[in-house]
Image (tube, coloured by chain):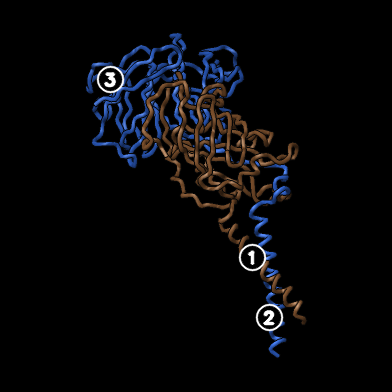
Amino acid sequence: MTRKGGRLWLAVLAVSVLLAGVASWRLTGGGSSQMVTEQTAPAPAEQSPSTTQLSPVDRPSGLPRDAGRSGVPRLLAIPRLSLEMPIVPVKVDRDGAMALPEKPTEIGWYAYGPRPGERGGSAVLGGHIDSRQYGSGPLAALRRLHKGDEVVVRTVSTRHTFRVVSVRLIRKQALPLRTLFDRDGEQRLRIITCGGPYIRSQGGYQNNLVVTAIPERTTPPPDRSMPRSPAGKVQG
Amino acid sequence: MRTLRRLLALGGSAALTIGFIVIGTGPAHAADQATVSILHGIPGATVDVYANGKALLKNFKPGTLTDPQMLPAGSYDLKVVKAGDGADGDAVVEANNVKVPVGANITVVAHLTAKAKPALTPYVNDVSTIPAGKARVIVRHDAAAPAVDVRANKEPVFTDLTNPKQQSAEVDAGTIKADVVLAGTDKVAIGPASLKLAEGTTTIVYAWGSAEDDNLKLAVQTISGMHGTPNGVPGGSGGQATAQAGSPVAAEAAVLGLAIVGIAISGSRLAKRRVTITR
């Protein structure tokens, strides 16, 4: 064998080692598509049935909460990804899954659960990463989110800021639905779309990409003269 | 100790205030407790309710439903007397050895039988999880009246319901117009009433009163917190997003695979070469 051949194989080895290193680093969570393990959220609280009156209820009625009311989420913004998407209230589809807006340019808010910014429980936003009819959408960029990235949800009058605590790819069959859609536990924002390999014969995407964020602060409506709370007291 | 609670009866009666007089001892321990509500569905008489000889409710007016109260599980002798008559007063109606199992959610209804005799019926409320987007409706016939149908938006949903039976269904959450008709007819006995069936909530509708005395009414109890979750989030249908950038894990796994093959081949070639040189 010639010296030239030896150099070639040395080069192949070097490149391979480099690639292997980068790929494993990314696979083990070093890269943008990191799968940060989130601390397991506490199990959903026991059912707490309570008798309520027929007269005015402050919790969800049979229908999605009125989209015109303030407090209803209108816009999702993720500054680092230059992502902005209108939010529409959604319910449940015929198969019992979360109903998502048809267009991947819109994201749905699960209107039976808490609103983003509402104390207690998980506010769930979900949307199509792509669609046969409309092609790829902005949520394809979600996998580039990092822990600590800022996520903003705007209502008519308020701006709720969240910080990403985890970005996870979860097998669809293993999705912890009770935790993701929890209505009583800690305040969370969940953004869910599809991800992982797309296998047409096995129903398309094999995974859900789940972004979990925790509340940072809420900017009160500008027209309200509220006493300023000292910086130290602002909920982090 | 007296907890004031708001009560309600659909069909006209004003909201009243009534409290459970706390029986049993010490603070509530959920482990050996049951949830008990009481509905007064006997027209005309304000009553006191005694449990095991102790006052449980005072000045309990027809058409009122107590909020649920945690009570120690066990067996109760219940006695309903005219208000002020005391534990030894003549019973309007009584029921001995009413079982209240641990963890159960029960509504005890004082009502008239089909033949207008007072009765006490304990119902166990179904508080199992309801599929996302749905509401549970339970109808209970506690009126001195013949068999009825209960309709939603004029469509019979529950048919041939007789005193003191109940029927249950899971329906789409939303607001319906409910009425009660004589079974198999369009003759409206009660209603219509607008009924909000909230998602993940059980709404129990009681028909009570007396057809003969023309005072049939509805009482409504709602129990929330039984919501299910969607069974998935079908977040993509095209596959273009993978075509565009590749799924992160799949792409990186492929690169890793290729790299390992590269290491193996080049490594073995180099090893061979070294062997050649050393010879």
- Asked if A57 appears above or below A199 in the picture, the reply is above
- Secondary element at image label 3: strand
Give the colour in which the image draws chain B.
blue
Label 1 to label 3: alpha-carbon separation: 81 Å
- Per the image, the residue denoted by label 2 is B271
- A55 sits to left or right of A94: left
Could one spot residue B165 in this view of the protein? Answer: no
The mark that comes first in sequence, 2 or 3, is 3
Q: Position of residue A200 (x, y in %)?
A: 73, 48
The answer to whether dots 1 and 3 both sit on one chain is: no
The amino acid type of the residue labelled 2 equals Ala
- Rendering quarter of residue B62: top left
Q: Quadrant of the N terminus of chain B?
A: top left
Q: Callout 1: 10 Å neighbours few (<14), some, many (20+)?
A: some
- Secondary element at image label 2: helix
Label 2 to label 3: alpha-carbon separation: 95 Å
- Asked if A66 appears above or below A233 in the picture, the reply is above
Q: Nearer the viewer, mark 2 or mark 3?
A: 2
- Per the image, the residue denoted by label 1 is A18
Q: Residue at x 41, y 30 (%)?
A: A50
Q: Residue at x 69, y 86 (%)?
A: B275
- Per the image, the residue denoted by label 3 is B58
